[in-house]
Image (spheres, helix red, strand yellow):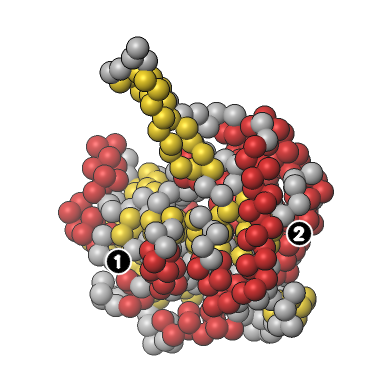
Amino acid sequence: MSDAYHHVLNPATGEVIETVPATSADEVGAAVARAAVAQRAWAAAAPADRARLLRRFATVVDEHIEELARLEVREAGHTIGNARWEAGNVRDLLDYAAGGAERLTGRQIPVAGGLDITFLEPLGVIGVIAPWNFPMPIAAWGTAPALAAGNAVLLKPAETTPLTALRLAALALEAGLPEHLFQVLPGAGDTAGAALVEHPGVAKIVFTGSTRVGKGIMAACARQVKRVTLELGGKSPNIVFADADLDAAVAATPMSFLDNSGQDCCARSRILVERPVYERFLELLAPAITSVVVGDPADERTQMGPLISRAQLDRVRSYVPDTLPGIRGGAPDGPGFWFPPTVLTGLDPDAPAAREEIFGPVAAVLPFDGEAEAVRLANATEYGLSGSVWTRDVGRAIRVSRAVQAGNLSVNSHSSVRYATPFGGYKQSGVGRELGPDALAAFTETKNVFFSTEA
């Protein structure tokens, strides 16, 4: 490895917990070469054998759920309950993808004069650039289906959260996956990440992160006509109509934007409430926000932990001056990167806090009058990742869900991500879809072959 290193901090204390060597551009090139060799053998293996090894990988992950979760708590500040779910999600993604390895079939297409068939062939070496907000599951979103489809994977974790990725690579070898098939390349985005994006031996990039960085990656991939999937920012609406079950809507609201301390692209950080119930909604919401338990993420009782870094804390603070009215919860005063649960009221709909992605435990509540204004406000951002609609009117739920420009809508809930359903965004929230029954096909080329039957 290179002589450069990254210090990994515990966000709850600000203390260095690990020092990890940073991958250089030359080392990325060597990793690509190794991966290309491993990929050819992996693609030639029987699909049933690939599936068997991926299921074994899932089993080994399951055997190390608690270890992986504790690592996630230390490097990312996630609550222990969330971290256990995230490790379990990696297991489930591997298991689900393994089931697709033997079902990745082409088609026989009726044509005149012969037989026409298609094949779905692996792309080759895939670069996955994972974010710091959900290091384990989002890494698996790209890695599991890419491997199942016969590709090799080079995973570049975020500088702040490389530990779970490195451990997963070790567990993959323990499970029996071929050496060099799945490699983890910790390092800086402008060094290791850029080298991965620009390397001609990498067939596709899967990136999750900010819209700004995603645009740069898309431009770099365009120079090589390289495939890319982008999952970027969000400013998702939580639309509450006057006919909704208000108690249920209020009860679900706090963790819809406070989960993972608001560091979630799907966070429902714009709460749109129909005017007849706006004041009552705020009355019910206040105690729900102030009662959220913020503290040590390793404590089973904690509902919200710290932000990832000092830089992220400063960013969140910049959107929330003390003079803004709203509802504020509590947070620890000691070391670490803490910010209290916050709901802003009385904002202009065009205010930065109401339209821009803050990526922290902050939401804005805005009133609306009628269905048309709800849709207009919901769509009044550059993003379109997720959103929720609360109503008892099924017709309205369908109309509004179709009208809101977002890739993942939920009615009377805040569910966004399931490994069995597609996920991705409209507008500047991304390009392409991940997860779901078509996930493996996104890592393949379609080859068409015609066989003449004419004498």
Q: Any mark on residue 233, and which? A: none
Pick the residue in front: 88 or 319: 88
Where does label 2 land, which residue?
Answer: 167
The residue shown at (63%, 67%) is 29
The percent coordinates of residue 125 (x first, y second) are 58, 53
Amino acid marked by disc 2: Arg
Q: Is residue 437 above or below residue 132?
A: above
Amino acid marked by disc 1: Glu
Q: Quadrant of residue 376?
A: bottom left
The residue shown at (67%, 51%) is 37
Element on which disc 2 rests: helix
Query: Horizontally, is 426 left or right of 374 in the view?
Result: right
Pick the residue in front: 19 or 26: 26
Element on which disc 1 rests: loop
Q: State which quarter of the image contains the N terminus.
A: bottom right
The percent coordinates of residue 143 (x first, y second) are 60, 51
**For the residues bearing labels 2 and 1, Cβ distance under 8 angstroms:** no
Where does label 1 land, which residue?
Answer: 382
Which tag is nearer the camera, tag 2 or tag 1? Answer: 2
The residue shown at (29%, 46%) is 401
For marks 2 and 1, give the CA distance: 37 Å
Query: Horizontally, is 291 left or right of 383 in the view?
Result: right
| 10 Å crowding of disc 1: few (<14), some (14-19), many (20+) | some
| 10 Å crowding of disc 2: few (<14), some (14-19), many (20+) | some
The percent coordinates of residue 364 (x first, y second) are 37, 70
